[in-house]
Each structure stands twice: as structure tokens, then as C-alpha cells.
Amino acid sequence: MSDAAAAAPAAPTIDDDANWQRLHPATLALAIVKLGPRSVNFLPAVAALGFTGNWVWIVPALLAFLLISLVAAWLHWLRFRFLVGDDEIVIESGVLSRQHRTIPFDRIQDVSIEQGLVSRALGIAKVGFETGAGGKENDADLDAIALDAAQALRTTIRAHRSDAMPTTAAAASDATETAAEHGDRLLFAMTPRQLLLAGLFNFSLAALAVVGAAMQFFDDFLPFDFNIFSIRDWTGLAERYGLEQWVVAHRWVAAIGAALSLLLIGFASGIVTMFFANWDFRLTREPRALRRTRGLTTRTDVAVPVKRVQAAILLTGWFRRLFGWHELRLQSLASDGEKERDHQVVPFAKLDDIDLVLAEVAIARPAPDVAWQQSHSVIALGGLVGALAASTGGLVAVAFGQALGWFGPVVGLAIGAAALFGVRFHRWTDLGEQVAIRRGFWKPRLTLLPHASVQSVDLKSDFILRPLGLATLVFGVPGGSSLASHEIPAIPLATARDLRDRILTARARA
Amino acid sequence: MTDTPAVHQTDPFDPEALNAAEGLDPVDPAFAQVLRIATALNLIPLAIGASVFDYLLIRHIEGPYGLITALAWLIAIIVILTFPSRRVARWGYKIGEGQLRVARGWLFRTDTIVPFVRVQHIDVGQGPVERWFGLSHLIVHTSGTHNSTVTLPGLPADLAAAMRETIRRHIQTDFA
């Protein structure tokens, strides 16, 4: 405690135990809920007891497990405390090995608030502090405190930041200053109607694939011997109930019925996922950040500091593009939750709405009459080699008498055609302050990368590109996925060098 | 960065020309020895493994005993003797104009430029083998997800330290 006070001499903190706060007691209830999934770990032990015939011990063992878990949760709760000072937040945690962490408010880039279904029922929320240190383990969170306390805490930290604003205002970019005048305002919201429309375009059979894979995987464990994805099982079922005559007679009806139910599942899963993820979606402009709240069961409240936006990514699909629907993601230093790397700030909107958001982060879409440059068609080579491999593999299988091998050349042809067709969609253009990179036909993707975000540039050539006088530019940009780096493939070497020089002379982004 | 067309720039059988054509400085030739030792440490266990496999299995099934052993050792020796010096010749770097340029490889050549102002922090490292030859490697960290570290090996230890100081000065002047 005295360490905390010593670390912040400016803070007139009364070093008193009364100032320390605990997490909300309802956190313990949350711990009980979390026991559910965790008890799966315990299943092998139960099974072992069962197999060895010690049935009587199962209930006591379960009780002991429950008790130990609860005591552990309670100890964690007891040994976790935090102190909100004037300039910093101090968190002490750990049952056996104590951890003492001080985070100055100045270093907190933003505060996120997340509420799961149970948390909402209990009126508590998980508060995450984004420090921009990178890496999950570097970011602290309070899991969980009362919702109003969480909001108050965020207001405190934000207020502190805006107090500090005048001193840094001189260095701040124009964008921040103009925005500060406007204060908070709504940039984008999604009505249930829009959600439904977005959900319809969100058609996917991915959910089906997941269930299918799970059924395959757990086939041996399921209590019933039936795989909904196996035609043999269905015909078996039909035979058993004398339906087989009917199915054979009305083959087309059955086929259409199956197709319709597939379609229905695809649409339903698309709509359901859209509703769960983006219910009551609101994107607001705050003095320093774009703030997004969304979610039906799990509500998240995330802010993307405007100055830390590194690039904008505009996504669409080949079909929804015909109707002018797009999705906007912003690449920032922090990642969006655990799965997504880029922050989805507009899930589904027309370009006019997206332009409003882009203007806030000082990124512009290329004008429609801008001259795009194409990548060389040699980039189809990878796909063609894949196509060749698939075809040869399939034909070899056919040669060995496996009729399914014909699948290979068919897939190979499709891959090859797609590769050749997709080449035309690899384009880029330099807009002076930023580079725009377009790619993909199936899922068109437009990356808007400000020159100032680029930390390093690779100019790559290899034994295929070099004889053609080509090179690939790869940009090192903060944030985003390490797997999907921004690159402009196969452009003439002189052009690549020229572009590299222009990008590297750009000044750092505010 | 001359605008020489790529076709005239490189002769696959004259790796030295590569750096000269691109205006890069070569790394220390002693780095070849470091690479050679590293390659040897990788390949010799593999060759030994191949010999053991040969001895235990091929002889047992009365196959052509000795073929795999001979091939493994032949390849290992050729690779250890010839590859490192070629690889070293294809490393190049240039420091100046406010940026660090590191190029490597020939079959897959990557030419990286990091402006000094984008450098987050700098490491100068030295492994035991490098120490033996008085070499160090310089690692430059950027905040980019791609290229978060750029490594330049094969620098004389004093040069690496001097380069670190040069870059460090630039980082400081940027913040001032």
C-alpha cells in the first residue's frame, strides 16, 4: 500500500484500507456459473470412479470438487482488491503469489466494459483497461464490479484524460481538435430492421458445418447411433418406418425439401448470429475515440482511440456488393476481443454511412474515377499449381480405381479458374497520403493504409518475380493479424521502389 | 537505389555483384564461419541419424546398405562447405539517410527498410559462436505486426554497437 502511495507522489491519496475496494460479491455467483464448463475437467475422474466400481464415492467427490472450487473462488475474491486513486488505479491480486500493479490514468488508452448474460442479470460488468502495452497478459481487468461503478470509473478516467488535453492539444492533430468541439454524437446505429436485412445477407452454412464436424467427431460417444449428415442413416431410418417407398416415389419432393431446409438453416443461422452479435449496435464519436456498444446476450462496450487507428478495411461479399452493402473494420494497436484482430465499427451499411465514420479517422475512400494499377497476373501461379496438384492427385486416384478421384480434376479446374479470374481484382493505387489495396472477388476487400502507419517496408522478389522485373511490397503495420499482412503483390520493380520511397518519407501519424 | 532494371542486376553465379548493384554494404565475411558451424550443428546430427537408420534397418532388410549413409554425409559436407559463404554474400545492409536497410536471400530476396524514427528499441546480441569470431547481431524492433523484429547478423561487435548508437540518437532526437 505504501508502495502505491510512493509511486504516485502527486496523488494526495489517503493511504487507508477504507479506500481499497473489492470486486462485487456477485462475482462469486459468476464463479459458480463458470463451474459448469469447468466441471468437464472432472469427468475423467468420475469415469474412473465408475469403472472401478466405486460408485458410492462419486457424489462425495463431486461435492468435494464443488467445495474446493468455491473456496478457491472465494479466496481469489478475498485477496483481490483495487484502489482508484486520483491519477492511477492500483490492483492487488493473487492468493499465494501476490501481484501489485499500478496503472497511471495517463497510460490507460481506454476502458472497455463487457457484460455477459449472467452478469447482466446480476447487474455487474467486467472492466478492461487497455494500456496499449500489447499482449493479453499486459492488460489488466476487473472481473467484475457493479455496472454503475464501472461506468463511473470509466467517466473518471476519461475526465482525467480530457483534463490533460489542453497540455497536449498543441501536439494533437486537427482531427482531434475539431472532434472535441462536437463532443459525443452518434455516428452509426443498427435498427432491428437493418439487422434482419444484414442477417439475410449473412447466409452461411458454417453453422451446419460445425454441427456436422461435431457429429463426426463425437460419433462414437453419442448415445444414439445416428448421424444427420449420413445419407445411409437417413435411408436406414426411412426403411425402418416404411418411408422408403414414399421417398423413392417422390424423390424430387424429398430433394427439394432437403434443399429448402438447408437454405432455411443457412438464413436462420445468419440472422441469429447477426442478432446476437450486433443487437442495439451503436457507434458514437467521443472526444478521443470511437465507442461501440453492441450485443444481445453479451454486451460489449469498446472504444477505439482515433489516433491509434492504423488502417481501415472495407469488406463486402460478391452478392451484397451488388446492393451496395459493406462492412468497415479499423485496424488498431489493440485487438477486438479474443477472436477478431480488427475492430468492426460498421457491420453492415451503405458507403455513404461508412464515409461518415471514415472521415472521423481521417481516412478517405478513393474517388470512383481514380486510376487503379493491377498486379501482374503471375500471382495466379500459386492457385494454378494447387489446381494442378489437385487434378493430378485426383487422376492418380482414378487410375487406382477410386471413382471419387474425379472430384480432383473438377476441384482443380474450379481452383484454376478462380485463381485466373481473381487476378484481375488485385489492384492498388497511391492516393498521396494513403495507399489503397483491393483484392478478391468472392469477398472483395479494400484496405486503406495511410503512409504514416507504415513502420517498415519489405521489397520482396524471388526466382519467379525477378526475371519478370517484378517485386512484392509488404508493409509492417501495427496491430492486425500477423497472418494477414498488408501487401501489394507482383508490381514492376521500379514502381515498387518509387512507392516505397514515397511511403517511407511520410511523417509519423499524429 | 539506382533504377537499374532487375534483369541486368543479378547474375546467379556472382553473388557479390548483388550487393554492389543495390548499393549495399556486405556483412563481415567471418559470418560465414558462424553460419558454417550453425549448419554443421544442424546437419551432422541428421547425418548421424541417417547412418543409424541405415545401420539398423536397411542392413537388416538386406537393402543397399551404405547408400543412405554415403548420401547423407555427402550432402551434409557439400552444404556445410559451400552454402554458408554463398548465403553470407547475399546478406547486405545500408545505414544512412535516416533509415536502416537490410537485404537477404537470393532465391527469395527480401529487402527491408526501417526508418530510424519507427524503431521502438534495439538489441545487440552475441551468441557463443559469434563471440568466438568477434561478431554481433543487431535486432531492431518496430511496432509493426509484420517485421516486428528485423535482424542484421554478421556485424563486427564494435560496428554493431556504433550502429546501435546511431539509431538511438535518431530515436532520441525524434522525441525531443
Image (tube, coloured by chain):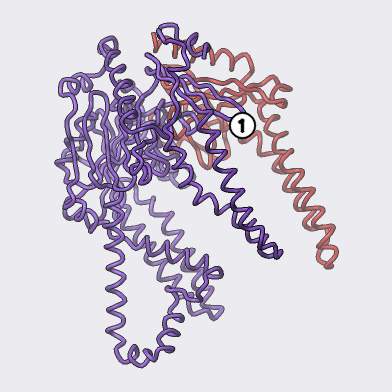
Q: Where is residue A419 in the image (x, y as percent from the top left)?
A: 36, 57
The quadrant where residue A130 appears: top left
Q: Where is residue A480 in the image (x, y as percent from the top left)?
A: 39, 37
Tell me the chain of label 1. Answer: B
Q: With B2 as the anchor, is A305 left or right in this view? A: left
Up/down of A415 relative to A122, above or below = below
Task: Please tell me which residue is depicted at 54% across the width and 81% down the height of the picture.
Answer: A401
The quadrant where residue A410 appears: bottom left
Task: Please tell me which residue is depicted at 54% across the width and 78% down the height of the picture.
Answer: A399
Q: Mark 1 points at which residue?
A: B88
Camera-nearest residue between A93 and B157 = A93
Task: Please tell me which residue is depicted at 45% across the width and 27% down the height of the picture.
Answer: A22
Up/down of B133 relative to A279, above or below = above
The answer to whether residue A489 of the structure is visible from this angle is no
Dot 1 amino acid type: Val
Image quarter in which the C terminus of chain A is found:
top left
Camera-nearest residue between A335 and A502 = A335
Q: With B27 as the anchor, is A4 left or right in this view? A: left
The answer to whether residue A412 of the structure is visible from this angle is yes
Q: Where is residue A214 in the image (x, y as percent from the top left)?
A: 47, 63
Q: With A184 as the anchor, is A11 left or right in this view? A: right
Q: Chain A is drawn in which colour?
A: purple
Regarding mark 1 in the picture, which secondary structure is present there? helix
Q: Where is residue A205 in the image (x, y as percent from the top left)?
A: 34, 63
Up/down of B13 relative to A162, above or below = below
The quadrant where residue A113 appears: top left
Q: Which chain is red?
A: B
Up/down of B94 relative to A322, above or below = above
Q: With A484 as the anchor, is A249 left or right in this view? A: left
